[in-house]
Image: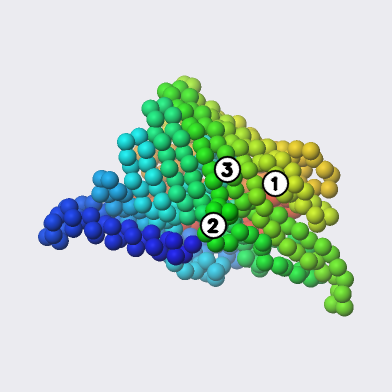
Amino acid sequence: MVRLVVALALTFCLTSAGIAQAAGGSWGKADEWADAFDVSGWAELTQSMRTQSPHDKVTSRARMRMELRADFDWLYGFLSLDAEKNWVIDDQTGAAIHEAWLEHTGDMWDLRVGRQVIIWGKADGLRITDNISPTDYTEPLTWDLDNMRLPVDAAKFRILGDSLTAEFIWIPVFRAATQPEKGSLWSVEPFPDSVRLIRHKADKPHGFSLKNSEFAMKLETYTAGFDVSVSVFYTWDDNPAMWYAPGLDEEGIFVDYTPDHRRLTIFGLDFSFPWTDFVFRGEAAFFRGRYLAATDGEPRKKNLVKYLLGVDWTPGNDWTVTAQITDDWIQDYESALSAKEHTPQVTLNVSKQFLSQTLTISNMTFFYLNDGEFVNRLMAEYEVMDGLSVALGWDHIHGDDGSYGMYRQNAQVWGRVRYSF
């Protein structure tokens, strides 16, 4: 995978230089060459503190992204680089290629090859049909969804009609979701400290091969008043199923713990349509053959339906309201499963802009209906000047030991300074 990205980056640079030389006849026409390139990026510093004892740091990091674009009419290239210094999670410190791809646009079609983030669906802050790019769970409640999508090495081919788009994706190298490191503030151990865990390396597909490849296809039609798409994704589950078996030896109780990535097919449907001040949205995904955790340590192969209905309301005066309801519905349910048959959730996002749209105050709530747990993010962001913004926020987490409540000790207040160029 690393070789593929490095090769693509070198191809991008060499191709750009070759095109520039051919177009100009010599290196003398540097101005024309320079006009084809554009450099942008951002740098930000984020700091937070727990709202409960011991009031220590939850997040403390400095991040930077540099983006290079090159447009030579028939060939477009994009390269983005990330660098981070993290004072809480040491493994996050470093630099890496985020995206690196080349794109050619023809008559009613285009082709993009390389490392890229691919976004599907129409949900706000939730992933229903948006499953192409895996998720980074390193800090699951402190990042926006845009920052949690991991890029994949893929080829994406689209046929662009007047009212119909067909999209085909080939991912030859599997990439799993990133889980929190053991000992991290966001790592939740499945067993008590008195139980010794024997962890095995995840069983997953390795290397570049057709056998291990993932394939996706989407058809989307759009008119002035209605957009709808259908999709299918033949993939590996980004999140491994967990097999575990308890035992007893001279050292005491132990659990043998083995994660395993299995094949999965996801069928998707989404739609949206506007009406006066509203936009109505919906998504549904049918996961065929997903392995779900069970209390006896033997995951069950089940079909799962995820669906969402949402509405965006813009009543004017710089107000925006977004409400959504979603559910995970396990087919052929068994009581031995760790998850419940239905997992309904409601989200509500209300925002208002002030001071000539330089100040935005918003409140986003994720609420689990089964157990009354919720996460609430209250945030104010002020644009000090072009490119420079300051944000302050409070992330409140309420619950016991469910999907949100298990992170309740990480409720925090935070601040962020961001400069874009």
* Mark 3–mark 1 distance (CA, rounded to whole Å): 13 Å
Q: Residues within 10 Å of mark 2 (few under 14, many from 20)?
A: few
Instruction: Tell me the CA gap for discs 2 and 1.
Output: 23 Å
Residue 247 left/right relative to 96: right
Q: Is residue 272 above or below residue 54?
A: above
Q: Amino acid at mark 3?
A: Phe
Front one among 389 and 154: 154
| Secondary structure found at label 2 | loop
User: Which of 396/17 is in front?
Assistant: 17
Q: Looking at the image, which is closer to me, 333 or 421?
A: 333
In percent of width and height, residue 50 lies at 61, 60
- Residue 364 visible? The answer is no
> Residue 311: image x %, image y %?
55, 30
The image quadrant of residue 97 is bottom left
Q: Which residue in the structure is indicated by mark 1?
A: 290
Crowding around mark 1 (Cα neighbors within 10 Å: few <14, some 14 to 19, many 20+) is: many
State how the image is colored: rainbow
Q: Give the spatial CA distance, label 3 vs label 2.
A: 17 Å
Element at label 1 = strand
Q: Residue tagged by mark 3?
A: 233
Q: Is residue 223 above or below residue 407?
A: above
Amino acid under label 1? Arg
Residue at the farthest bottom position: 250
Q: Earlier in the sequence, mark 2 or mark 1?
A: 2
- Farthest left residue? 28
Q: What's the amino acid at mark 2?
A: Ser
The residue labelled by disc 2 is 209
Q: Position of residue 281 (x, y in %)?
A: 54, 30
Residue extending furthest front? 210
Task: Kindly identify which numbered label has been placed on residue 234.
Answer: none
Q: Residue at x 41, y 51 (%)?
A: 113
